[in-house]
Amino acid sequence: GKSDAGDWGKGKGKGRKGPRDLSEMPQGCTSVIVKNLSYDTVEDTLHDVFQDCGAIERVNILTDRDTGRSKGFGFIDFETPEGASRAMSKFDEVVDGRAIYVDWSERKGGGKGKW
């Protein structure tokens, strides 16, 4: 029988939601959201994990205002859309013991936050 091993790169995982299809990538998107982070994961760690995807403009892990604890997700802004698209290859990579979830972020600086 034909083995499925050659298809693992397609991201068509059965059952669980795999990475988004690259055809769904928002035009000109340069940011990704990373979820399911360990509370121990820091921005430097994410920078190290994603730096081979392309030049990173900034990494921002969201924290609770009162406790300063990580909320378990963050954003990575790349300098180019190519970086953001390559970042999808990190889907399910284990960081600090957790398999991370990567999706495109469509946040455009709409006057929120530090933009």
Image: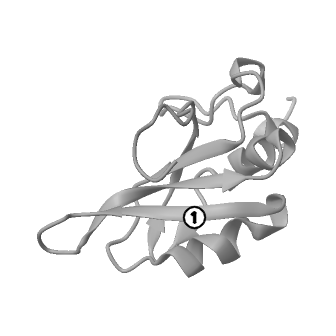
In the picture, residue 44 is in which quadrant? bottom right
Q: Is residue 59 left or right of residue 27?
A: left
Q: Is residue 46 above or below residue 112?
A: below
Q: Is residue 46 above or below residue 71?
A: below
Residue for badge 1: 59
Residue 7, horizontal then vertical, whole percent:
82, 35
Residue 88, horizontal then vertical, whole percent:
70, 45
Q: In this rendered view, identify the residue nearer to me: 15 or 27.
A: 27
Residue drawn where x is 85% and y is 29% of the image = 1
Residue 12, horizontal then vertical, whole percent:
67, 29
Residue drawn where x is 50% and y is 57% of the image = 100
In the picture, residue 28 is in which quadrant? top right
Q: Farthest residue in the left direction?
A: 66
Q: Amino acid at mark 1?
A: Val
Q: Is residue 46 above or below residue 78?
A: below
Secondary element at tag 1:
strand
Q: Is residue 98 left or right of residue 109?
A: left
Q: In this rendered view, identify the residue nearer to me: 12 or 53.
A: 53
Residue drawn where x is 53% and y is 72% of the image = 95
Scheme of colours in the image: one colour
